[in-house]
Image (tube, coloured by chain):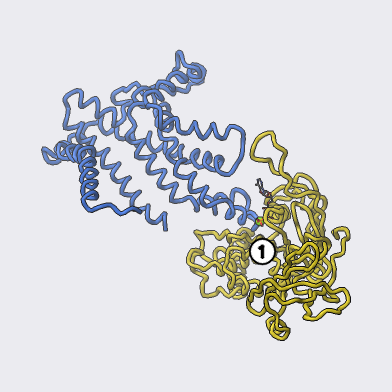
Chain colours: A yellow, B blue
C-alpha cells in the first residue's frame, strides 16, 4: 500500500506559438512508501509542484498512471481522491472562521453536527489553535494560518497528505519551528505524507525519504543519509550541500582535512588565501600549489582553526577525510 | 508621493470642486428645487397620474429583469474569462466593452435589425412563434441588459483574478463538487464585487434612455419607461411632472451610490 507513480509525463504549451511544448515531467516513475514522510527536493522549476498536483488530481498528466493505496486514481477527479493538500500560500477560506475552515471537508461529507464539532475541537487542539477557533484567517499569523490549513487537510482523514512548500512563505525561525512540529505531528498521525521543498536542510532534517527532482526527472531516491553519503551523481551532491572540487572530484568542504606539515600520504600542498568566520565554522579559501593554481573552499571548526594557528599566507597540506564517501556514479534508483 | 506646494493644492482643489459643482451638483440641485417649487404638489400630482405610475412600474420591471439576467450571465462569463482557457477568449473580452463604447441608440437600432417582426433577421420567425420582442417588454429588457452588460463583469473579473484559484482547488481536494465549490467558495469570495456590480447595473438600467427609446416604440401607457416619459412631458410643457419623475430617478441613483459607498470599505477590509 503506497503511492505508485508510473511513467508520468506532463507538457505545458510554450508561450510563443509554434514552439516546442515545455516538458515539466519527463517519464517519471516513483513509489512513495506508506506511512512515511517523503520530501520532493529540487531546484525551482524542476517539476515538484506539478508532480504533487498530479498526485492530488489538481492537474492532469499527459500520460502515465497514479495509483493511491492500490486504487487507480489516474482519472479520478480531485474530490474523489481523499487527498489532503496544503498550499504554499495557505489557501485559507477567507470568509470562514478557523473552525469553519477545518470543518469544511466534514460538512461536505454531511457528517453529524456533534461529530464535526468534536473532530474540529480535536484537530484545533492538535495544531494548537483552540483559542483562535472563531477568528477569521486574516486575523492569524502566517504560521498559524498554515497550521489551520494542515488541520483542515487532516480533517478528512486523507489517505495521503500533500504539502507544497508549506513553510516557504514563512520567516526562517517560524519555518524551523514548524518543520520540527511537522515531524512530531507525523510521528503521531502516521499519514503518508509528501512535502515539496527546495531547501535541502529542511528535507534532510524532516524526511524519512527524499526524492531529488531536477528538470522533470528523478535524480535519486533514498534516505537522507544515503543521499548525503552516497549521492548518485554530481547534481545530487551539489544540491545537498556545499561542494568543492579537487582534481575533478567533488568533496564537501568540511570533509577535507587540513595539516600544517607535509608527509601525509596523498596530501596536496596549498596556501591559505583568505578566511571568513561564520558562526562556529571558518571558511578558508586556499590556493592549490599545482600548475593550475585553483582556489577552493575548505571549512574547519573554530577550535581546529585556532589549534592549527591557521592564517592567510600559511602553507598547508590538504587531504580528503577517510570515510567521507566519494560520489558513486550509479544509475538512478527509482 | 510628490509633495505639492500649498498654493498648488488650493488651486487644484478649487478647480475640481468648481468643476463638480458646475457639472453635477448645481444641475441636480436645480431638479430638486424645481420639484419642490410648489411643495409636494408636483410629486402628489405625478403619483396620481396613471401614465406616471405605469411608467415607473415598467422601469422597475425592466431594470430588475435586466439586472437579474446580467447577474447570472455576468458571473458565468467572469468565471469563464478568468478560470478557463479557450480559443477566442481575447475576442470575447474585447467584445464585452462594446456596450460601453457604442452609443445606446446604435444598440437599439442593432436590436431592431435582428428582432424586428417584419424585416428583422430573427424577428419574423419569433413573431410566427408568437413571441414579440420589439415594441414590448422583452425587447426593452434586452436593450437594457445589453447596455449594462459589462458592469457586473468588470467588477467581478479583477476580484476573481486577485483571489486566485487556490481556495477553489483546496475545496475540491476536500471533497467539494464544482457546484459546491461555486456556492461555498467562489461566490462568497466575490460577494462584494457582485453587490457593487449589481448596484451599478441597477443605476445604469434605471436611467437607460436611448436604446429603450428605439426598441420600445415609446407607446404611452404601454411601453413608456420613466426616462421616456420625462422627455415626453418636458416636450409637452408638463414641467412639474417631468421634474418630479427626474427627482425620483435621481433619488434612486443616489440611493445606489450611497449603498455602494457604504459597502466599499467593507470590501477592502
Ligand atoms: N500551468 C502552467 N503552464 C505552463 N507552464 C507551467 C505551468 N505550471 C508549471 N509550469 C512550468 O513547469 C515547470 C515546473 O513547474 P513546477 O511548478 O512544477 O516547479 P517546481 O519544482 O514546483 O518549482 P518551484 O520550486 O519554483 O515551485 C516550470 O518551468 C513551470 O514554468
Ligand atoms: Mg512549486
Q: How many marks?
A: 1
Residue at the left extreme of this rendering: B38
User: In this rendering, does residue A192 appear at all?
Assistant: no
Residue at the bottom extreme of this rendering: A307
Q: Judge left or right: residue B254 versus residue B183.
A: left
- Residue at the image position 54 percent from the left and 64 percent from the top: A100
The answer to whether the beta carbon of the residue marked 1 is less than 8 Å from any atom of ligand 2 is no
Vertical placement of residue A198 versus B7, above or below:
below
| Closer to the camera in the image, A184 or A226 | A226
- Counting from the top left corner in percent of width and height, residue A227 is at 80, 67
- Residue at the image position 40 percent from the left and 30 percent from the top: B101
- Counting from the top left corner in percent of width and height, residue B107 is at 41, 25
- Residue at the image position 45 percent from the left and 41 percent from the top: B154
- Counting from the top left corner in percent of width and height, residue B126 is at 50, 20
Q: Judge left or right: residue A25 versus residue B11.
A: right
Residue position for label 1: A156
Vertical placement of residue A85 versus A306, above or below:
above
Vertical placement of residue A197 versus A261, above or below:
above
Q: Judge left or right: residue B7 versus residue A24.
A: left
Residue A12: image quadrant is top right
- Counting from the top left corner in percent of width and height, residue A284 is at 69, 73
Residue A33: image quadrant is bottom right
| Closer to the camera in the image, B245 or A274 | A274
Task: Give SS at disc 1.
Answer: loop
Q: What's the chain of the residue with tag 1?
A: A
Q: Quadrant of the N terminus of chain A?
A: bottom right
User: In this rendering, does residue B165 appear at all?
Assistant: yes
Vertical placement of residue A162 versus A309, above or below:
above
Q: Quadrant of the C terminus of chain A?
A: bottom right
Amino acid at each position: 500500500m503506497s503511492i505508485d507513480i508510473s511513467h508520468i509525463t506532463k507538457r505545458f504549451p510554450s508561450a510563443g506559438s509554434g514552439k516546442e511544448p515545455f516538458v515539466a515531467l519527463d517519464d517519471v516513475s516513483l513509489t512513495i512508501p506508506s506511512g512515511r514522510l517523503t520530501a520532493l527536493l529540487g531546484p525551482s522549476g524542476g517539476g515538484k509542484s506539478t508532480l504533487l498536483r498530479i498526485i492530488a488530481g489538481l492537474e492532469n498528466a499527459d500520460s502515465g498512471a497514479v495509483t493511491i493505496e492500490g486504487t487507480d486514481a489516474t482519472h479520478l477527479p480531485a474530490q474523489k481522491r481523499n487527498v489532503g493538500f496544503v498550499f504554499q500560500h495557505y489557501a485559507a477560506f477567507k470568509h470562514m472562521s478557523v473552525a469553519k475552515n477545518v470543518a469544511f471537508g466534514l460538512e461536505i461529507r454531511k457528517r453529524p453536527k456533534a461529530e464535526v464539532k468534536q473532530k474540529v475541537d480535536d484537530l484545533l487542539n492538535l495544531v494548537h489553535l483552540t483559542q483562535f477557533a472563531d477568528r477569521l484567517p486574516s486575523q492569524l499569523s502566517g504560521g498559524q494560518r498554515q497550521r489551520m490549513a494542515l488541520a483542515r487537510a487532516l480533517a478528512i482523514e486523507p489517505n495521503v497528505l500533500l504539502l507544497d512548500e508549506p513553510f516557504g512563505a514563512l520567516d526562517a525561525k517560524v519555518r524551523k519551528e514548524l518543520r520540527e512540529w511537522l515531524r512530531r505531528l507525523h510521528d503521531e498521525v502516521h499519514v503518508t505524507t509528501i512535502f515539496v521543498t527546495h531547501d535541502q536542510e529542511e528535507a534532510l532534517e524532516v524526511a524519512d525519504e527524499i526524492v531529488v527532482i531536477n528538470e522533470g526527472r528523478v535524480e535519486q531516491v533514498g534516505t537522507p543519509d544515503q543521499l548525503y553519503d552516497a549521492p548518485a551523481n554530481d547534481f545530487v551532491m551539489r544540491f545537498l550541500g556545499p561542494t568543492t572540487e579537487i582534481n575533478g572530484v567533488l568533496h564537501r568542504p568540511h570533509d577535507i582535512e587540513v595539516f600544517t606539515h607535509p608527509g601525509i600520504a596523498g596530501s596536496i600542498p596549498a596556501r591559505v588565501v583568505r578566511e571568513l568566520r561564520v558562526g562556529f565554522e571558518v571558511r578558508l579559501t586556499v590556493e592549490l600549489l599545482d600548475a593550475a593554481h585553483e582556489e577552493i573552499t575548505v571549512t574547519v571548526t573554530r577550535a581546529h582553526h585556532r589549534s592549527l594557528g591557521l592564517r592567510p599566507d600559511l602553507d598547508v597540506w590538504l587531504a580528503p577525510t577517510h570515510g567521507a564517501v566519494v560520489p558513486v556514479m550509479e544509475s538512478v534508483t527509482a | 508621493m510628490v509633495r505639492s506646494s500649498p498654493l498648488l493644492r488650493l488651486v487644484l482643489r478649487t478647480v475640481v470642486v468648481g468643476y463638480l459643482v458646475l457639472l453635477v451638483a448645481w444641475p441636480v440641485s436645480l431638479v430638486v428645487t424645481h420639484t419642490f417649487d410648489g411643495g409636494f404638489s408636483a410629486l402628489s400630482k405625478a403619483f396620481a397620474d396613471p401614465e406616471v405610475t405605469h411608467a415607473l412600474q415598467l422601469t422597475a420591471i425592466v431594470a430588475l429583469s435586466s439586472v437579474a439576467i446580467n447577474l447570472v450571465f455576468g458571473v458565468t462569463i467572469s468565471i469563464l474569462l478568468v478560470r478557463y482557457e479557450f480559443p477566442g477568449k481575447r475576442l470575447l473580452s474585447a467584445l464585452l466593452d462594446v456596450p460601453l463604447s457604442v452609443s445606446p441608440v446604435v444598440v437599439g437600432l442593432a436590436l431592431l435589425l435582428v428582432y424586428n417582426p417584419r424585416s428583422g433577421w430573427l424577428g419574423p420567425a419569433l413573431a410566427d412563434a408568437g413571441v414579440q420582442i420589439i415594441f414590448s417588454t422583452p425587447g426593452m429588457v434586452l436593450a437594457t441588459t445589453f447596455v449594462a452588460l459589462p458592469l457586473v463583469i468588470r467588477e467581478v473579473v479583477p476580484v476573481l483574478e486577485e483571489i486566485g484559484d487556490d481556495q477553489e482547488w483546496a475545496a475540491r481536494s476536500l471533497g467539494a463538487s464544482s457546484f459546491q465549490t461555486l456556492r461555498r467558495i467562489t461566490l462568497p469570495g466575490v460577494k462584494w464585487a457582485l453587490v457593487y456590480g449589481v448596484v451599478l447595473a441597477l443605476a445604469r438600467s434605471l436611467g437607460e434612455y436611448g436604446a429603450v427609446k428605439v426598441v420600445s416604440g415609446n407607446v404611452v401607457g404601454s411601453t413608456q419607461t420613466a426616462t421616456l416619459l420625462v422627455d415626453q412631458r418636458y416636450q409637452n410643457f408638463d414641467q412639474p411632472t417631468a421634474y418630479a419623475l427626474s427627482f425620483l430617478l435621481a433619488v434612486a441613483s443616489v440611493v445606489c451610490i450611497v449603498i455602494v459607498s457604504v459597502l466599499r470599505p467593507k470590501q477592502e477590509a
